Image: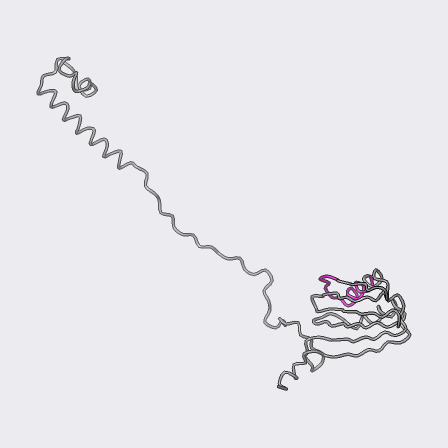
Amino acid sequence: MLSFAQVYNYPQEKLCHHGASKWLTILMVKERERIDMHVSVKREDKTIRPVKLKPQKYNRPKQCCPIRDDEPKDHFVKRGDTEFAGTHLILDLWGAKHLDDIDHMEKTMRECVEKAQATLLHIHLHHFTPAGGISGVAVLAESHISVHTWPERGFAAFDVFMCGTSKPEEVIAVLKQAFYPKSMKITENLRGVVADENIF
């Protein structure tokens, strides 16, 4: 007589050949089906289900250098009771030298930017022929310095416009030392005076 374990592990068509009666064979087959079903249910219960993760709160870092409410955001200048956008100097140099030397001009403009405590973005200079005049601009974060020269007349026209905390007046001494003009005419304009905005 076969044991239960032997009956369970033997194929159905071989049970009768090993001494199992017909009714026992049917009983064992049904029992095996019941056990298989029970095992499969347990296996299904043990299946891994996806775990729902709780959303984590993301704390944004605080601004490293927050802008204070009392700081000007437009770089306007305040001189006494006058508030304006910037200082515009118009400089006419007569009897000047080295007005056809483009390398000297670039060096001088860079020195102007440094002395004025401005921020240079880029310089573009053009050398005209045959007269040898120079035309160009130094683009600044604070605005610009532009130049046009007539070497044949010893004349140079400079425009210096700067806003913020820069010091455009420091350019005057640099230009005198670089080009040795016999005379210099200086005109100062305050651009964007706040009181003028109500004119129109």
* Magenta-colored stretch includes residue 73: no
**Residue 14 drawn at (x, y percent):** 17, 16
**Which residue is pictured at 35% across the width and 44% down the height?**
51
Quadrant of the rendering where the N terminus is positioned: top left
Task: Please tell me whether residue 18 is drawn above or below residue 114 in the rendered image.
Answer: above
**Residue 149 drawn at (x, y percent):** 83, 69
- In the picture, measured across the screen, residue 124 lies left or right of residue 39, that is right
Residue at the left extreme of this rendering: 23
Q: What's drawn in magenta, residue-wise?
A: 107-123
**Which residue is pictured at 77% across the width and 75% down the height?**
89
* Magenta-colored stretch includes residue 116: yes
Task: Please tell me whether residue 28 is drawn above or below residue 178 in the rendered image.
Answer: above
Colour theme: one colour
Q: Nearer the viewer, residue 62 or 191?
A: 191
- In the picture, measured across the screen, residue 130 lies left or right of residue 78, that is right
**Residue 86 drawn at (x, y percent):** 71, 75
Q: Picture quarter containing residue 186? A: bottom right
**Which residue is pictured at 9% across the width and 16% down the height?**
21
**Residue 44 drawn at (x, y percent):** 26, 36
Q: Picture quarter containing residue 10? A: top left
Quadrant of the rendering where the C terminus is positioned: bottom right
- In the picture, measured across the screen, residue 160 lies left or right of residue 41, that is right
